[in-house]
């Protein structure tokens, strides 16, 4: 058969139930990852999918699961999807239910941070697909509420984040209790050595499919970098960008404290009805409500840590602002992947103080791109750096130089030597 460019899900001979759901959800053309992965996944191949965020990976594994499970059967789980965070678990569950709405297949989502009673009741009522965080899966399994002997498919989503968050022991325990004979799919935006090691342990002769070079931002994302002297100037620049025009913006901070403080600042400036704050210290209901308010357009600004950097699919995000440069460099790709999703354009803006330039250079090495630098807009007030903040930045730059050159003595020693030379 002469090869042709696939433009329709019909090429994969999905049944009417799935095609109707795809049509209603607005899926028309295949994304590159779907075009390359769907065929091998449907044929039963173990595989590793490496692709940028925002390229339709959830549908890429959900559709083969739904097609091969086909219809409800028994009461025990037959497909397991593991995700690193409860937010992503909830989202994946919603996505699978949407695509499987006409199949009758039952999807249950379980995660920590809430009591297990309701989740156990949903499992007891019967299910076909289980979406779970690793810890909650083991809790419910060890309590005797999960029967896994009929499990045929296992998916690990956001595998690099799983490894960063220390889930390897929990995943090993899960692999020990589920049937050996099953199809395995592993998806990740990056493929560091830890993920490669995990894949080697449980995938059987896997097919590795890379849709783009590892850690490559989606081309639809316009990246820009502003160099700023201090924290106060960052705040001025932030307000200038947020006041510029109507937009939906996610602001990423490196710590929970920073997210809280910036959230309070923006609430004072823009009003509580426009801003939500999301981080690991927030209660489960607060976190879900914050994401839903932002997804539904009830608020225009979401301030968060990297808890939502990976996998959370919120359509219509026009801007991502890295208020702080991430110290885990792969997180830069995941953060900016919250915009420019599904072939839509988006803007990723990063603020960089002098010590953060070191991390920007490492990120540029990772993504094999230079992030364009723009001058600060003339309307942005450039504040003088307080002495204490300047000293902290100098110490951080010294620390970075020592990491690169263990013989480096530090700026303090350089100043001391200069003074001694002057005296001579």
Image (cartoon, rainbow, N blue to C red):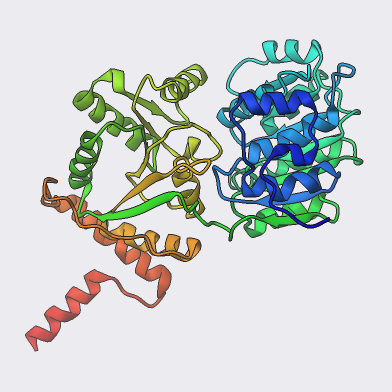
Q: Residue at x 71, y 55 (%)?
A: 209
Q: Residue most toward the bottom?
A: 424
Q: Residue most toward the front?
A: 2
The answer to whether 282 appears left or right of 38 in the picture is: left
Residue 233 visible, this angle: yes
> Front-most of 172 and 253?
253
> Front-most of 275 and 287?
275
In the rendered image, residue 122, in percent from the top left (x then y), is placed at 74, 12
Residue 96 visible, this angle: no
In the rendered image, residue 86, in percent from the top left (x then y), is placed at 59, 28
Q: Residue at x 82, y 36 (%)?
A: 153
Q: Residue at x 67, y 16 (%)?
A: 116
> Front-most of 103 and 388?
103
Q: Is residue 140 above or below residue 340?
A: above
The answer to whether 312 appears left or right of 128 in the picture is: left
The answer to whether 39 appears left or right of 20 in the picture is: right
Q: Quadrant of residue 185?
A: top right
Q: How many marks?
A: 0
Quadrant where the N terminus is found in the figure: bottom right
In the rendered image, residue 389, in percent from the top left (x then y), is placed at 20, 51
Q: Quadrant of residue 246?
A: top left
The answer to whether 412 appears left or right of 378 in the picture is: right
Quadrant where the C terminus is found in the figure: bottom left
Q: Is residue 204 above or below residue 118?
A: below
In the rendered image, residue 79, in percent from the top left (x then y), is placed at 80, 30
> Front-most of 98 and 145?
98
Q: Residue most toward the left?
A: 423
Q: Residue at x 63, y 49 (%)?
A: 32
């Amino acid at each position: 058969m002469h090869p042709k460019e696939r433009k329709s899900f019909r090429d994969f001979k999905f049944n009417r139930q799935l095609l109707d759901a795809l049509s209603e959800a607005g899926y028309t053309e295949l994304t590159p990852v779907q075009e390359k992965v769907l065929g091998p996944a449907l044929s039963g191949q173990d595989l590793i999918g490496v692709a940028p965020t925002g390229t339709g990976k959830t549908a890429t594994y959900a559709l083969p699961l739904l097609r091969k499970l086909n219809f409800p059967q028994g009461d025990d789980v037959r497909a397991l999807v593991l995700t690193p965070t409860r937010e992503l678990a909830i989202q994946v569950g919603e996505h699978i239910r949407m695509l499987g709405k006409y199949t009758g297949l039952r999807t249950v989502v379980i995660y920590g941070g809430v009591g297990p009673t309701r989740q156990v009741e949903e499992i007891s009522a019967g299910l076909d697909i289980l979406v779970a965080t690793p810890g909650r899966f083991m809790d419910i399994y060890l309590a005797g509420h999960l029967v896994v002997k009929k499990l045929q498919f296992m998916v690990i989503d956001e595998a690099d984040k799983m490894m960063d968050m220390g889930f390897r022991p929990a995943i090993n325990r899960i692999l020990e209790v589920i049937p050996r004979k099953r199809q395995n799919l592993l998806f990740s935006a990056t493929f560091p050595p830890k993920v490669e090691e995990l894949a080697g342990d449980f995938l059987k002769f896997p097919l590795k499919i890379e849709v783009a070079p590892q850690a490559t931002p989606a081309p639809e994302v316009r990246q820009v970098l502003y160099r700023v002297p201090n924290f106060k100037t960052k705040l001025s620049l932030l307000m200038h960008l947020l006041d510029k025009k109507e937009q939906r913006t996610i602001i990423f901070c490196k710590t929970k404290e920073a997210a809280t403080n910036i959230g309070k600042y923006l609430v004072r400036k823009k009003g509580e009805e426009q801003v939500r704050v999301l981080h690991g210290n927030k209660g489960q209901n607060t976190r879900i409500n914050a994401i839903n308010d932002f997804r539904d357009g009830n608020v225009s600004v979401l301030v968060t840590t990297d808890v939502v950097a990976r996998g959370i699919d919120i359509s219509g995000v026009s801007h991502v602002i890295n208020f702080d440069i991430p110290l885990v460099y792969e997180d830069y790709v995941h953060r900016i992947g919250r915009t420019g999703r599904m072939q839509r354009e988006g803007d990723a803006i990063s603020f960089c103080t002098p010590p953060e330039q070191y991390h920007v250079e490492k990120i540029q090495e990772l993504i094999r791109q230079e992030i364009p630098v723009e001058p600060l807009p003339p309307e942005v007030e450039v504040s003088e750096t307080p002495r204490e903040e300047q000293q902290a930045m100098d110490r951080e730059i010294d620390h970075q130089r020592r990491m690169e050159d263990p013989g480096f003595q530090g700026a303090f020693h350089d100043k001391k030597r200069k003074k001694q030379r002057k005296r001579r």
